[in-house]
Amino acid sequence: MERVLEPEVMDTAEEAETYDAMDHSEVNHAFVQRFLELGGGGRVLDVGCGPGHVPLLLVALDPAVEVVGVDLSREMLRIAEEHRAVSPHGGRVSFQLGDAKALPFPDASFDAVMSNTILHHVPDPVPFLRECGRVVRPGGALLVRDLFRPASEAEVDALVARHAAAAPPRARELFRASLCAALTPEELREAAREAGLAEVEVVIDTDRHMSLQRSASDASTG
């Protein structure tokens, strides 16, 4: 099945609020657990932080971590700030506007970099991945998780029925569009190679998620 791109930025109030209302708690917990298993910690960058669920979960689980979340959507950041304001751990999180393809940070300025289900919004993954590799310090952990594109429309239908049958119509539409816009594992491996990322692997996490990952112990200057 060919990739069908969707808008790069979910920047209307309706889109942001619909996404924020979707229940991603299970996959967010799994993502953060993987990040910690890879040795992620210290000063962390979350690329495409959306409504801030993942950064706030991470600081709740690790009392030593600080997170900077960056997103291109002002509406997502508005909601993220609302969540941060009521979190007991919000003082260790900050959010700012920024483009994942041209991050506003110096080289090697973070101990670890993570990104959760943002890659499918990016038309060309190579600049995105190159930037993730640029801002993480030598030896830092890297975790980029996303959906992967099914092989057929029938498989898309099955995934939507399995995971979003009870969701509102707009949420089902967003999930379907995201599946169709995602990369395949092979495309992700090739993009990582073109981006010059070293010591990374692509693993299949669930029936719809894959991760490009590198543990802190395995990371190199890349």
Image (cartoon, rainbow, N blue to C red):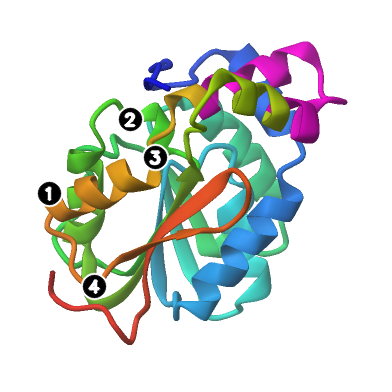
Q: Which residue is mark 3?
A: 184
Amino acid type at mark 1: Glu
Residue 1 horizontal/vertical position (percent) = 43, 22
When the figure is inspected, residue 45 is found, relative to residue 2, above or below; the finding is below
When the figure is inspected, residue 51 is found, relative to residue 141, above or below; the finding is above
For the residue labelled by badge 2, is the local secondary structure a helix, a strand or a loop?
loop
Label disc, if present, on residue 194 of the rendered structure = 1
Q: CA distance from mark 4 to mark 3?
A: 19 Å
Is the Cβ of the residue at disc 4 closer than 8 Å to that at disc 2? Answer: no
- Lower sequence index among marks 2 and 3: 2
Q: Between tags 2 and 3, which lies in front?
A: 3
Identified at 15% across, 58% down, the residue is 106
For the residue labelled by badge 1, is the local secondary structure a helix, a strand or a loop?
helix
Based on the picture, tell me whether residue 125 belongs to the magenta stretch. no
- Lower sequence index among marks 4 and 2: 2
Magenta residues (range): 160-179
Q: Which residue is mark 2?
A: 122
